[in-house]
Amino acid sequence: MSEQGTSEWRNYEETIEKFIQAIAKNMSLYGITPSVGRLYGVLYFSEEPMTLDDMRDALKMSKTSMSTGVRTLYDMKMVESTFKRGIRKDLYQSEEDWYKSFTTLFGNRWRQHTETNIEEAVEAIEHLKTIKETTTDETLMTKIDYDIERLQYARNYYEWLMQFIQVIESGKIFDYIPKK
């Protein structure tokens, strides 16, 4: 018979809590706050889907914070809504496939920023070309040519990065680096 107040249970809970803290800390790499990272960790280790009230009780945070955190994780495809007969409240559980979560999260975050950088590079090149067409300053024209080359290099890099993102998003990355 197991007693949840024993030192073994306390040791177990401390070990799980330490790992949840590590998850929360590392989620900042993806733009996720530590509190939302802790929420994900609690959901991940929960044997049953949880309601917002369950989450609030587990994390000692407001129901509003839990709702916002769940929405963030849901949008990132890290949690999913589920149904259990006889329970009228919304239930949530963590996405168990971390590989799927990573590819979705990485793709969304990097795609957005990379597309913006490509657009900015193209816009800067066009603007510099316009300036070059209207100036008679030879030094400025030389500087513009130099900077256009650098911007084209940057654009090429970002286009390569888009291809990398597509490899991640499509799951082809697992052909090169298999899941364990």
Image (spheres, helix red, strand yellow):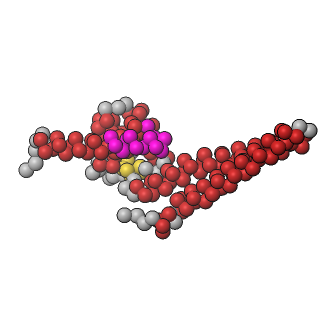
- The kind of secondary structure the magenta stretch mainly shows is helix
Instruction: Report which quarter residue 162 is drawn in.
Output: bottom right
Residue 131 visible somewhere in the drawing: no
Residue furthest to the left: 1
Q: Which residue is drawn at 71% across and 44% down?
A: 120
Residue 78 appears left or right of 138 = left
Q: What is the tally of numbered marks visible in this picture?
A: 0
Residue 92 place in picture, x, y as percent:
38, 47
Residue furthest to the front: 139
Q: Which residue is drawn at 49% across and 47% down?
A: 75
**Bounds of the magenta segment:** 21-33
Residue 25 place in picture, x, y as percent:
38, 40
Q: Which residue is drawn at 57% across and 56% down?
A: 165
Residue 70 appears left or right of 112 = left
Residue 150 appears left or right of 4 = right
Q: In which quarter of the image is the C terminus?
A: bottom left
Residue furthest to the bottom: 175
Q: Is 10 within the magenta?
A: no
Q: In this view, does 67 lie above or below 84?
A: above
From the viewer's side, name the closer residue of 180 and 3. Answer: 180
Residue 162 appears left or right of 41 = right
From the viewer's side, name the closer residue of 92 and 140. Answer: 140
Q: Which residue is drawn at 50% across and 54% down?
A: 104
Q: In this view, does 174 lie above or below 50?
A: below
From the viewer's side, name the closer residue of 85 and 102. Answer: 102
Q: Is 29 within the magenta?
A: yes
Residue 69 place in picture, x, y as percent:
43, 39
Residue 25 visible somewhere in the drawing: yes
Residue 76 place in picture, x, y as percent:
48, 48
